[in-house]
Image: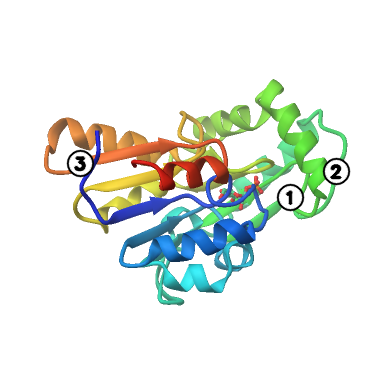
Amino acid sequence: MKIDTNNYVFDIDGTLTPSRGKISEDFKHFFLEWMEGKNVYFVTGSDKNKTVEQIGEEIWNKATRCYQSCGNAVYEKGKLIRQLDFPLSKKLDELLREFLLWSQWTERYTTNIEPRIGLINFSVIGRDCPQEARDKYAKWDNKTKERLAFCDIIHEKFPELEASVGGQISIDIYLKGKNKSQILKDISGPVIFFGDKCKPGGNDFPIVDYLFHEGLTDYTRKYKVHEVTDYKDTWSVLTQDY
Ligand code: M1P
Protein backbone atom coordinates (compact mmCIF):
# COMPACT_ATOMS: atom_id res chain seq x y z
CA MET A 1 0.00 0.00 0.00
CA LYS A 2 1.26 3.47 -0.90
CA ILE A 3 1.77 5.89 2.02
CA ASP A 4 1.06 9.56 1.60
CA THR A 5 4.00 11.26 3.35
CA ASN A 6 6.96 13.54 2.95
CA ASN A 7 8.99 11.89 5.75
CA TYR A 8 11.74 9.52 4.65
CA VAL A 9 14.19 7.83 7.03
CA PHE A 10 17.32 6.15 5.66
CA ASP A 11 19.98 3.96 7.20
CA ILE A 12 23.36 4.60 5.48
CA ASP A 13 25.71 1.58 5.34
CA GLY A 14 24.27 -1.15 3.14
CA THR A 15 21.30 1.10 2.26
CA LEU A 16 22.75 4.22 0.59
CA THR A 17 26.39 3.08 0.38
CA PRO A 18 28.34 -0.16 0.65
CA SER A 19 29.24 -0.87 4.30
CA ARG A 20 31.79 1.84 5.24
CA GLY A 21 32.14 2.62 1.52
CA LYS A 22 31.47 5.78 -0.46
CA ILE A 23 28.24 6.53 -2.27
CA SER A 24 28.43 5.91 -6.03
CA GLU A 25 28.65 9.12 -8.11
CA ASP A 26 25.58 8.22 -10.22
CA PHE A 27 23.43 7.48 -7.21
CA LYS A 28 24.68 10.64 -5.47
CA HIS A 29 23.40 12.83 -8.34
CA PHE A 30 20.08 11.03 -8.41
CA PHE A 31 19.65 11.19 -4.64
CA LEU A 32 20.51 14.90 -4.32
CA GLU A 33 17.78 15.73 -6.79
CA TRP A 34 15.33 13.25 -5.25
CA MET A 35 15.78 14.86 -1.79
CA GLU A 36 14.45 18.19 -3.06
CA GLY A 37 11.35 19.29 -1.08
CA LYS A 38 11.29 16.16 1.10
CA ASN A 39 11.95 15.64 4.82
CA VAL A 40 14.92 13.30 4.72
CA TYR A 41 16.36 11.86 7.93
CA PHE A 42 19.52 9.74 8.20
CA VAL A 43 20.01 7.27 11.04
CA THR A 44 23.21 5.30 11.43
CA GLY A 45 25.45 3.75 14.06
CA SER A 46 28.36 5.65 12.56
CA ASP A 47 29.71 8.97 13.73
CA LYS A 48 29.44 12.24 11.79
CA ASN A 49 32.91 12.12 10.22
CA LYS A 50 32.45 8.64 8.79
CA THR A 51 29.02 9.44 7.39
CA VAL A 52 30.17 12.69 5.76
CA GLU A 53 33.12 10.82 4.25
CA GLN A 54 30.67 8.27 2.83
CA ILE A 55 27.77 10.34 1.49
CA GLY A 56 29.50 13.71 1.08
CA GLU A 57 28.81 17.03 2.77
CA GLU A 58 26.19 18.15 0.25
CA ILE A 59 23.79 15.29 0.97
CA TRP A 60 24.56 15.28 4.72
CA ASN A 61 23.84 19.03 5.04
CA LYS A 62 20.72 18.83 2.89
CA ALA A 63 19.05 16.34 5.25
CA THR A 64 16.39 17.61 7.63
CA ARG A 65 18.24 15.92 10.50
CA CYS A 66 21.13 13.44 10.83
CA TYR A 67 20.99 10.93 13.65
CA GLN A 68 24.51 9.62 14.27
CA SER A 69 25.43 6.93 16.85
CA CYS A 70 21.91 5.43 16.47
CA GLY A 71 20.33 8.77 17.46
CA ASN A 72 22.60 9.53 20.40
CA ALA A 73 24.22 12.43 18.53
CA VAL A 74 21.74 14.57 16.58
CA TYR A 75 22.76 17.12 13.93
CA GLU A 76 20.68 19.75 12.18
CA LYS A 77 22.17 21.78 9.34
CA GLY A 78 25.62 20.54 10.31
CA LYS A 79 25.29 21.54 14.00
CA LEU A 80 25.20 19.14 16.93
CA ILE A 81 21.88 19.91 18.65
CA ARG A 82 21.66 17.01 21.12
CA GLN A 83 23.84 14.28 22.51
CA LEU A 84 23.71 11.52 25.09
CA ASP A 85 27.00 10.47 26.61
CA PHE A 86 27.84 6.85 27.26
CA PRO A 87 31.34 6.45 28.70
CA LEU A 88 32.96 3.04 28.45
CA SER A 89 32.95 1.39 31.90
CA LYS A 90 35.84 -0.72 33.18
CA LYS A 91 33.54 -3.76 33.39
CA LEU A 92 32.39 -3.50 29.79
CA ASP A 93 35.93 -2.82 28.60
CA GLU A 94 37.06 -6.01 30.36
CA LEU A 95 34.31 -8.07 28.74
CA LEU A 96 35.14 -6.74 25.26
CA ARG A 97 38.80 -7.63 25.83
CA GLU A 98 37.71 -11.13 26.83
CA PHE A 99 35.77 -11.37 23.53
CA LEU A 100 39.04 -10.56 21.74
CA LEU A 101 40.68 -13.54 23.47
CA TRP A 102 37.74 -15.92 22.95
CA SER A 103 37.19 -15.26 19.25
CA GLN A 104 38.40 -17.94 16.85
CA TRP A 105 38.94 -15.32 14.14
CA THR A 106 42.73 -15.03 13.66
CA GLU A 107 43.40 -12.17 11.19
CA ARG A 108 43.54 -9.10 13.44
CA TYR A 109 44.00 -5.36 12.87
CA THR A 110 43.73 -2.41 15.25
CA THR A 111 40.94 -0.22 16.72
CA ASN A 112 38.87 -2.97 18.25
CA ILE A 113 37.04 -0.71 20.69
CA GLU A 114 35.90 2.68 19.40
CA PRO A 115 34.02 4.97 21.81
CA ARG A 116 31.68 7.39 19.98
CA ILE A 117 29.15 9.90 21.32
CA GLY A 118 26.56 7.75 23.10
CA LEU A 119 27.79 4.48 21.62
CA ILE A 120 30.70 2.04 21.80
CA ASN A 121 31.64 0.23 18.61
CA PHE A 122 33.40 -3.14 19.02
CA SER A 123 35.11 -5.20 16.35
CA VAL A 124 37.16 -8.39 16.74
CA ILE A 125 38.96 -7.95 13.43
CA GLY A 126 39.60 -4.24 14.10
CA ARG A 127 38.21 -1.17 12.34
CA ASP A 128 41.49 -0.57 10.48
CA CYS A 129 41.18 -3.73 8.41
CA PRO A 130 41.22 -3.57 4.60
CA GLN A 131 38.02 -4.18 2.58
CA GLU A 132 39.09 -7.69 1.57
CA ALA A 133 39.47 -8.72 5.22
CA ARG A 134 36.12 -7.05 6.02
CA ASP A 135 34.41 -9.19 3.39
CA LYS A 136 36.08 -12.36 4.70
CA TYR A 137 35.10 -11.62 8.31
CA ALA A 138 31.51 -10.76 7.33
CA LYS A 139 31.18 -14.11 5.53
CA TRP A 140 32.67 -16.00 8.49
CA ASP A 141 30.48 -14.15 10.99
CA ASN A 142 27.43 -14.96 8.89
CA LYS A 143 28.20 -18.65 9.40
CA THR A 144 29.41 -18.62 13.01
CA LYS A 145 27.07 -15.83 14.22
CA GLU A 146 29.86 -14.63 16.50
CA ARG A 147 28.56 -11.07 16.69
CA LEU A 148 25.02 -12.15 17.62
CA ALA A 149 26.52 -14.32 20.38
CA PHE A 150 28.50 -11.33 21.71
CA CYS A 151 25.30 -9.26 21.75
CA ASP A 152 23.50 -11.99 23.73
CA ILE A 153 26.30 -12.12 26.32
CA ILE A 154 26.25 -8.32 26.68
CA HIS A 155 22.47 -8.41 27.25
CA GLU A 156 22.88 -11.13 29.85
CA LYS A 157 25.71 -9.46 31.78
CA PHE A 158 24.56 -5.85 31.38
CA PRO A 159 20.74 -5.61 31.53
CA GLU A 160 21.02 -1.82 31.30
CA LEU A 161 22.69 -2.04 27.87
CA GLU A 162 21.70 -2.99 24.35
CA ALA A 163 23.96 -4.33 21.61
CA SER A 164 23.25 -4.86 17.92
CA VAL A 165 24.91 -5.86 14.66
CA GLY A 166 25.40 -2.78 12.48
CA GLY A 167 27.52 -3.31 9.40
CA GLN A 168 30.00 -5.97 8.29
CA ILE A 169 32.54 -6.30 11.08
CA SER A 170 31.34 -4.73 14.32
CA ILE A 171 28.65 -4.40 16.94
CA ASP A 172 27.21 -1.20 18.41
CA ILE A 173 26.59 -0.96 22.16
CA TYR A 174 24.48 1.75 23.84
CA LEU A 175 22.17 2.32 26.80
CA LYS A 176 19.01 0.21 26.74
CA GLY A 177 16.35 1.84 24.57
CA LYS A 178 18.82 4.30 23.06
CA ASN A 179 18.66 2.46 19.76
CA LYS A 180 17.58 3.78 16.35
CA SER A 181 13.89 3.72 17.31
CA GLN A 182 14.37 6.74 19.61
CA ILE A 183 14.43 9.02 16.55
CA LEU A 184 10.78 8.28 15.77
CA LYS A 185 9.72 10.35 18.79
CA ASP A 186 11.10 13.39 16.91
CA ILE A 187 9.20 12.74 13.70
CA SER A 188 5.46 13.10 13.58
CA GLY A 189 3.20 11.68 10.91
CA PRO A 190 3.65 8.81 8.49
CA VAL A 191 7.16 7.61 7.67
CA ILE A 192 8.83 5.52 5.03
CA PHE A 193 11.95 3.70 6.25
CA PHE A 194 14.79 2.15 4.26
CA GLY A 195 17.28 -0.16 5.98
CA ASP A 196 19.29 -3.33 5.38
CA LYS A 197 19.51 -4.78 8.92
CA CYS A 198 15.80 -5.06 9.74
CA LYS A 199 15.83 -8.56 11.24
CA PRO A 200 16.11 -9.22 15.03
CA GLY A 201 19.70 -8.55 16.15
CA GLY A 202 20.26 -5.99 13.37
CA ASN A 203 20.51 -2.31 14.27
CA ASP A 204 17.53 -1.34 12.04
CA PHE A 205 15.27 -3.84 13.79
CA PRO A 206 14.29 -1.52 16.70
CA ILE A 207 12.83 0.97 14.19
CA VAL A 208 10.80 -1.71 12.42
CA ASP A 209 9.70 -3.23 15.72
CA TYR A 210 8.70 0.17 17.15
CA LEU A 211 6.65 1.06 14.07
CA PHE A 212 4.95 -2.32 14.10
CA HIS A 213 3.98 -2.16 17.79
CA GLU A 214 3.01 1.50 17.64
CA GLY A 215 0.87 0.65 14.62
CA LEU A 216 -1.12 -1.83 16.72
CA THR A 217 -2.34 0.90 19.07
CA ASP A 218 -1.89 4.16 17.18
CA TYR A 219 -3.69 4.08 13.86
CA THR A 220 -2.68 7.65 13.07
CA ARG A 221 0.91 6.72 12.25
CA LYS A 222 1.05 5.07 8.85
CA TYR A 223 4.40 3.59 7.87
CA LYS A 224 6.17 1.55 5.30
CA VAL A 225 9.45 -0.37 5.69
CA HIS A 226 11.68 -1.21 2.75
CA GLU A 227 14.26 -3.82 3.73
CA VAL A 228 16.85 -3.44 1.00
CA THR A 229 19.85 -5.54 -0.02
CA ASP A 230 22.12 -2.66 -1.11
CA TYR A 231 22.04 0.90 -2.49
CA LYS A 232 21.02 -0.33 -5.94
CA ASP A 233 17.95 -1.89 -4.39
CA THR A 234 17.17 1.42 -2.62
CA TRP A 235 17.68 3.29 -5.90
CA SER A 236 15.38 0.93 -7.71
CA VAL A 237 12.63 1.38 -5.07
CA LEU A 238 13.00 5.18 -5.24
CA THR A 239 12.50 5.14 -9.00
CA GLN A 240 9.40 2.97 -8.69
CA ASP A 241 6.22 3.28 -6.73
CA TYR A 242 7.32 3.51 -3.08
O1 M1P B 1 25.84 2.09 9.98
C1 M1P B 1 26.04 0.74 10.08
C2 M1P B 1 27.33 0.39 10.77
O2 M1P B 1 28.44 0.76 9.98
C3 M1P B 1 29.63 0.37 10.49
O3 M1P B 1 29.65 -1.01 10.62
P1 M1P B 1 30.83 -1.98 10.19
O4 M1P B 1 32.11 -1.25 10.39
O5 M1P B 1 30.65 -3.16 11.06
O6 M1P B 1 30.62 -2.32 8.73
C4 M1P B 1 29.88 0.96 11.87
O7 M1P B 1 30.10 2.35 11.76
C5 M1P B 1 28.70 0.67 12.76
O8 M1P B 1 28.83 1.37 13.96
C6 M1P B 1 27.43 1.08 12.11
O9 M1P B 1 26.34 0.72 12.90
Q: Residue furthest right?
A: 107
Q: Quadrant of the C terminus?
A: top left
Dot 1 crowding, Cα within 10 Å, few <14, some 14–19, many 20+: some
Name the residue located 18 percent from the left edge and 43 percent from the top edge: 221
Q: Which residue is mark 1?
A: 112
Name the amino acid type tagged 3. Lys
Q: Earlier in the sequence, mark 3 or mark 1?
A: 1
Measured in 3D between alpha carbons, the distance from the residue under mark 2 to the one under mark 3, in whole angstroms, is 45 Å
The numbered dot on residue 5 is none
Q: Is mark 3 within 8 Å of ligand 1?
A: no
- Quarter of the image for residue 188 reads bottom left
Q: Which residue is mark 2?
A: 108
Name the amino acid type tagged 2. Arg
Name the amino acid type tagged 1. Asn
Q: Which residue is mark 3?
A: 222
Q: Earlier in the sequence, mark 2 or mark 3?
A: 2
